[in-house]
Amino acid sequence: MDYGDKLFWLSVLIQRRYAQICAGYDLTSSQATLLCAVKDEPRRMTYLAASLGMAKNALSQLVDRTERRDLVSRVTSEHDRRVVMLSATPTGKVLAEAVYAEITRGLPDIARNLDADDQRDFERVATAIVDASGVSTSS
């Protein structure tokens, strides 16, 4: 297996573990990602579509399903009616905090069979990749 193959299988391991954690909270992976993205502050729908890599109509459908569960709510900006903000409801915030904590505790399990030095290297490299990617929590 070459490097690309290894990265493919690493992504499968991460996605599988993530989906298992989300299912424990009766959430799809997409719903959990959305909730975690708005758990700390409201976000513009346009920002969410871009940062989550979703088409606007796909995001709207995801928001519709998540909104029906009373986990998120949409609010139109007072300053510009074209701007729609998405925020977690009180119920959604509690759930988002719980699932996020479980994700951050549970995802490192994929490296549990590595020795301590390799686990530290994995953490260092994963951190460097994320930091260099431009992924940001700002809206």
Image (cartoon, rainbow, N blue to C red):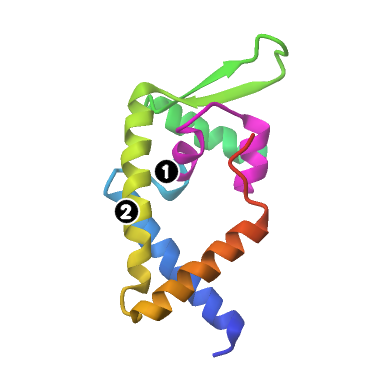
Residue appearing at x 70%, y 13% in the figure: 81
Query: Which of the 4 image quadrants contains residue 90?
Result: top left
Residue 52 percent location from the top left of the image:
60, 46
Q: Secondary structure at mark 2?
A: helix
- In the picture, measured across the screen, residue 35 lies left or right of residue 23, that is right
Please tell me which residue lies in front, 20 or 106: 106
| Number of on-image labels | 2
Crowding near the residue tagged with mark 2, few <14, some 14–19, many ≥20 C-alpha atoms within 10 Å? many
Residue linked to disc 2: 21
Residue appearing at x 33%, y 35% in the figure: 95
Crowding near the residue tagged with mark 1, few <14, some 14–19, many ≥20 C-alpha atoms within 10 Å? many
Quadrant in which the N terminus is drawn? bottom right
| In the image, residue 105 above or below residue 129 | above
Residue found at the far bottom of this picture = 1
Residue 113 percent location from the top left of the image:
31, 79
Query: Which of the 4 image quadrants contains residue 136?
Result: top right
Of the numbered discs 1 and 2, the one sitting upstream in the chain is: 2
User: Pointers 1 and 2 in contact (CB under 8 A)?
Assistant: yes
Residue appearing at x 33%, y 26% in the figure: 91
Residue appearing at x 47%, y 46% in the figure: 30
| Magenta stretch prevailing secondary structure | helix
Residue found at the far top of this picture = 78
- In the picture, measured across the screen, residue 43 lies left or right of residue 65, that is right
The segment highlighted magenta reads 33-55
Amino acid type at image mark 2: Ile
Residue linked to disc 1: 32
Cα distance in 3D space between marks 1 and 2: 9 Å
Please tell me which residue lies in front, 90 or 16: 90
Residue 50 percent location from the top left of the image:
67, 43
